[in-house]
Each structure stands twice: as structure tokens, then as C-alpha cells.
Amino acid sequence: MTVLRARVLGVGGYLPARVLTNDDLSKMVDTSDEWIRERTGIRERRIAAPEELTSTLGLHAARAALANAGIGADEVDLIVVATSTPDETFPATATKIQAGLGITRGAAFDVQAVCAGFIFALSTADNFLKAGQFRTALVIGAETFSRILDWNDRGTCVLFGDGAGAVVLQAAEGEGTSDDRGVLSTHLFSDGRHHDALYVDGGVSSTQSAGHLRMEGKEVFRHAVVKLADSVNEALEANGLTAEAIDWLVPHQANARIIIGTARKMGLPMEKVVMTVDRHGNTSAASIPLALSEAVADGRILPGQVVLVEAIGGGLAWGSALIRW
Ligand code: UT7
């Protein structure tokens, strides 16, 4: 029997032009390039221009992904945007990107799982495509975290950046055929008991203001190391694979120490790990598709290779996905 697979047709990314370096930050808060590099691996991050909204970034990434896929926007019938920094409270940022692309059919909506958002959006689109309800999906992670940072809090403002990434998925006959490429599995998890570890202290229903990001960094770090390893193992087990089968680990880019720790636990050499955190900082839901687009553009990720993606963030929410590219 053949079953439908969500195949990756293309990927693209967009970064705002403005670069904010660690030295720039050391003039704003009591920090240093040395501290930031040693504790996080971050050297610089991008900051959106005032007129650039999350939808602006997402639209650029979507266009790049469609060009990479070699298909027109008219083929897309599903847009899922992962973001925690929407343009407006409503409508969904996805509908603004849909309009920007000139698409008037199908559905467009947002999902919110903070830094794990891209995995949740990918899983959502994958399930719709496998079920046959839509055929071609744009899955976008787009964020302007610079707008919700407390620029006086050195514990958080040095960590995040703005950006967007997108992948194009299309339903195709997969398992049981000679060409079994596509999303092999997704695993999603949440545990709302850990709300206080990472949240925004505002919102429509609570304060009627956007609020600022608050994080107990050590607490999140502690959960990240354990939960990411668990979800990675679950992904491998579900597919009957071992870590040796992984060609590329493309993790959420929050902290180089977390990424190196996860690779070490898996026994993966760092040559198989895609790292962008040094130049992008933590771009939340955008970090994985941005890293994917970089590694495809420079020829590292090739068709047929097995790519493992994983992320954790506010909620706490976390998960992993295995993709045969
Ligand atoms: O994407 C969402 C998921 N988020 C994450 O995965 C983040 C996970 N957490 C982390 O990446 C790390 O916990 C941080 C990078 C946020 C912090 O690193 P840490 O090694 O856990 O440092 P810490 O928070 O324990 O702080 C150590 C020291 C403290 O000083 P004292 O109390 O030891 O005197 C902080 O006040 O470093 C101080 N500190 C800073 N110093 C210079 C905190 N932030 C800074 C800073 N510059 N920017």
C-alpha cells in the first residue's frame, strides 16, 4: 500500500539587514562579547527595521521558498505560520502573508508554540497533507522578538533576534514506493506546569498590552537538555533508526551549549550539525527553517538525506521531526 507523504519541495529564509553585535549590546546593558559568546555562542543577531513586521519577514521567506521549489503561489492551498509575535492580535499573520502572495483560495492560519512553533506548524501541515485535505503547503516560522524584549534585562535581551524561514510541502505518494522522501514523523509535547520558566508578562486578556519576554534561563536549560534528548530518541525509535542514520541535525538555535550537548548525547559529530546561532541568535520559530535554508543553499543538505529537527520553548512546548529530504 502506498500512503501520502508531505514532500519538501523547497526552502527559503529572510533576515533583516540591521546587524546588532555583542559589542553594540555592551553599550546598552552591563554585558560583554566574551560573556555572550562563552555562555551562548552568539556573536550577532538581526533586528527588523521599524516598518518590517512579522508578516513582511514571513512574506520574503515564503517567496524565497516558492522560488527554491520552482512552483508558483497559485499552487499553495494551505499556509501555516508559526509565530509568537503576530502583526496584530487578529487576524492571523498567515492571512496577511496569503494576501501578500496573491492567494485567494485554501486556508491560512497561525499556530503558537513559541520556539517549538515550526515543529508544531510542520506537524499540522504534514497531517493535513497526509489526510488529503490540502495538497501544497507553506510552513513558515516568522518572528520579531526584538519587539517583546526588555532591552534593560541583560539576561534575555542578548539572546534573541528577528528573522523568518519557510518550507514548501506537497503531498505525494511515499511509503511503499521507490521514492520515500518527505516528513517521516513528528512528535509534539507540552507541559503547561512550566509556564513561569519562559513567558511574556502581557497579552490581550491579561494586561491589554504586548508585554515583555521573561525567562528563568537556567530552568529552561535544564529542561532542554533532557526533553530534547527524549524527543529525539522517540523520533528515532518510531522510525526504527539509530543516530548513525542521521545525515543532519538541524536543532532550534537557542544556545550553542544546548546544541552541542544534544549532539554529544546522540553520539553525532558536530560536522553533522547545522549551527546558525552565532549569526542569528535565537529567532524562535524561525530558527529551524532559517538553518534549513542556509544548509540547503550551501549544498550541505541533499535530496534523500535524513534530517532531524528538534526544538523546545515557552509552554513548555517541545518536539522533533524526521524528514527524508
Ligand atoms: O528558545 C527558548 C528556549 N530558551 C533557551 O533554551 C535558553 C536556555 N537557557 C540558556 O541558554 C542559559 O541559561 C542562558 C544563556 C540564558 C544563561 O546562561 P547561564 O550559564 O545559565 O547563566 P546564568 O543565568 O546562571 O547567569 C550566570 C551569571 C549571573 O551572575 P551571578 O548571579 O553568577 O553573579 C548573571 O547575572 O551571569 C550573569 N548574566 C550576565 N552577565 C553578563 C546573565 N546575563 C548576563 C549577560 N552578560 N548578558
Image (cartoon, rainbow, N blue to C red):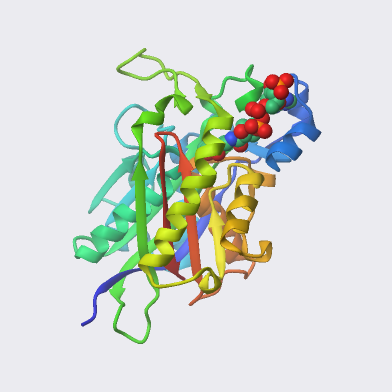
From the viewer's side, name the closer residue of 315 and 76: 315
Q: Residue 25 is drawn in which quadrant?
A: top right
Closer to the camera in the image, 133 or 113: 113
Of 285 and 193, the residue lying toward us: 193
Report the residue at 20% width, 63% height from top.
Answer: 131
Position in image of residue 40 (x %, y %): 68, 39
Quarter holding the N terminus is bottom left
Apparent side of residue 274 relative to residue 143 in the rendered image (left or right)? right
Q: Position of residue 65 (x, y in %)?
A: 47, 59
Q: Quadrant of residue 15?
A: top right
Q: Is residue 87 above or below residue 113?
A: above
- Vertical position of residue 182 compared to residue 29: above or below: below
Residue at 56%, 66% in the rendered image:
248
User: Which residue lies at the image location 52% right of the left edge and 42% below the top edge?
Assistant: 224
* Residue sitting at the far bottom: 178
Can residue 47 be seen in this snapshot? no
Answer whether residue 241 is visible to the viewer in this image.
Answer: yes
